[in-house]
Amino acid sequence: MPIRVTLDAMLARRGMTARELAAGVGLSETQLSLFRSGKVRGIRFRTLAKLCAVLECAPGELLGYEHDESDLAETDGD
């Protein structure tokens, strides 16, 4: 998938642990771990906003994108 989660880099810059972030946002450590690993299919804007508020960053600092031609292919259900 061309969308990658760059949350670990932000945690390192902030000197914060995943456990501290999970507590600050109100997520379980398991939920946060799934997001960090990119194993989730989506994230609620509200959750993303909470992550940004705690980390004092913008959504684009937590997510990256690598162009993939298949992103432009038509698919069912999108």
Image: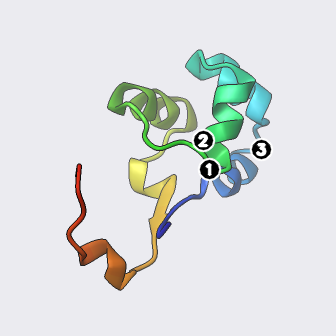
Tell which circle, 2 or 3, labels the residue nearer the N-terminal end: 3
Helix or strand or loop: what does disc 1 sit on? helix
Is residue 19 depicted above or below 70 in this figure? above
Identify the residue under disc 2. Answer: 35
Mark 2 and mark 3: Cα distance apart in space: 19 Å
Whole-percent x, y for residue 2 in the image: 47, 70
Whole-percent x, y for residue 76 in the image: 23, 56
The picture quadrant where one finds residue 29 is: top right
Discs 3, 1 touching: Cβ within 8 Å: no
Please tell me how crowded label 3 is: few (under 14), some (14-19), or many (20+) other residues with Cα within 10 Å: few
Discs 2, 1 touching: Cβ within 8 Å: yes
Mark 3 and mark 1: Cα distance apart in space: 12 Å
Helix or strand or loop: what does disc 2 sit on? helix
Whole-percent x, y for residue 56 in the image: 50, 39
Q: Which mark is residue 15?
A: 3
Identify the residue under disc 1. Answer: 7
Query: Which residue is drawn at the image coordinates 68% and 19% (left, top)?
Result: 28
Of 56 and 28, nearer the camera is 28
Of 56 and 48, nearer the camera is 48
Is residue 37 toward the left or the right of residue 41 in the image?
Answer: right
Query: Which residue is drawn at the image coordinates 68% and 50% (left, top)?
Result: 37
